[in-house]
Image: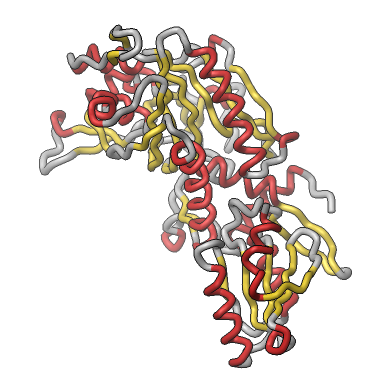
Amino acid sequence: MTISRDQVMDKVVALTKRRGFIYPSSEIYGGLSGFYDYGPYGVALKRAIRDLWWRHMVELRNDVVGLESTLMMPEAVWEASGHLQNFVDPLRQCLGECKKRWRADKVLGEKCPECGGTLDDARMFNLMFKTHVGPLEDRASEVYLRPETAQGMFVDFKNVISSTRVRVPFGIAQQGKAFRNEITPGNFVFRVREFELMEMEYFVRPHQDEEAFDYWRKERLRWYTDVLGVNRERLRMYDHPQESLSHYSKQTTDIEYEFPFGWGELEGIADRTDFDLAVHQEKSKQDLTYLDPETNERYLPWVIEPAVSVERIFITLLLDAYDEDVVNNEPRVLLRLHPNVAPVQVAVFPLSKKQELIDVAQMVIGSLRGQFRVEYDQTGGSIGKRYRRQDEIGTPFCVTVDFDTLTDQAVTIRRRDSTEQERVAIATLPARLTELAH
């Protein structure tokens, strides 16, 4: 069935609530704008995204190591990095009835888009959350929740090179929460105030950034299409013009996805040169240079940074996978998620609640755990309804244990996308599912 792009977002938002992917945070108290909770299937999808990113960015490489830095960092870090001065958006507030605040660069004219009231003059608003550590709330106790994970990797750069055997070129990767006090969060989880970042700082010799920048542009695009299964026709590369670059960037390319609300950034690949190490070296008075064992020279490495939020990938995958079709004259909703990211990869059903079928189904589940993300459903509803439920959460394969299983030791695999079924011996089931998934 053909679904207009305008309808997809509303349908996906409804599906995520209905099927336990995402809930509004603190919903019983009216919710909190820009914050969301993740339900059982949302947690599973996010974990799959994180694990695949870590697998391909760290574990399958010889030149990248991991790091986990703190969520809070002192003001000195953000002063040196430029975030106190530059991590800002222009803000305008409605002086009329609604009193809403808007990003000035997203509002046309002088009238409030909500109530038509007059907007005040634009002023700059810093997006970082500030809090205090310790019992006293004074200037000396001020700290900031990180708006990115990158600075933790830069301030720990010296520790990493002195405690490991890494050699330039190499990368430091990190996953974790970040916080941005967005003026107008929106488009569901596309722009939120609390999110998870996955960033990698790849250190190269000075002025040898172009080759690495080109490599990571291509490699990150390949990951979305080949590993996550995102439709290539809905992806494009956008090179930032010089006037729109961040304060630390020499050049930046965004991998953009065609969202229902237009093209938007999925991931950014930035050439940060030696900006961050240089400013932290100056501010901290610590020597952050690297002694190159091949050339015997000291220098501050330049940095290429691929950075993406889990939430951006999350909503991209759901929008890209959402589909509707008709099976046996009945409409159905399904998520055509790649098996790599599906929250449930295999669902196992006993055809009825008969104990002999349940016993076999439990044995089948045991043979699949450890290789697949599996779910067991013995609710006793019709097999068709159970299939439909799994279609909506994106499960690629359903395995049914029926009464014939008791005599032939075989089960039925049903494929989500085609609804085709095949009979497979229990003994060869894990191997067959692995084959189908790839």
Q: What is the x, y in percent for residue 140? A: 13, 29
Q: Is residue 120 visible?
A: yes
In the image, is residue 204 above or below residue 235?
A: above
Q: Is residue 378 above or below residue 35?
A: below
Closer to the camera in the image, 272 or 122: 272
Residue 3 position, x and y percent, is 80, 49
The residue depicted at 66 percent of the width and 70 percent of the height is 428
Is the N terminus in the top left, top right, bottom left or bottom right quadrant? bottom right
Residue occupying image coordinates x 52% and y 45%: 52
Percent x, y of residue 134: 13, 42
Q: In terms of image quadrants, where is residue 437?
A: bottom right
Horizontal arrangement in the rendering, residue 386 relative to residue 269 (left or right): right
Up-down relation of residue 177 to residue 365 (above or below)? above
The single residue placed furthest to the left in the displayed view is 135
Nearer to the camera, 242 or 261? 242
Kindly identify the residue that appears in the image at 76 percent across and 58 percent down.
417
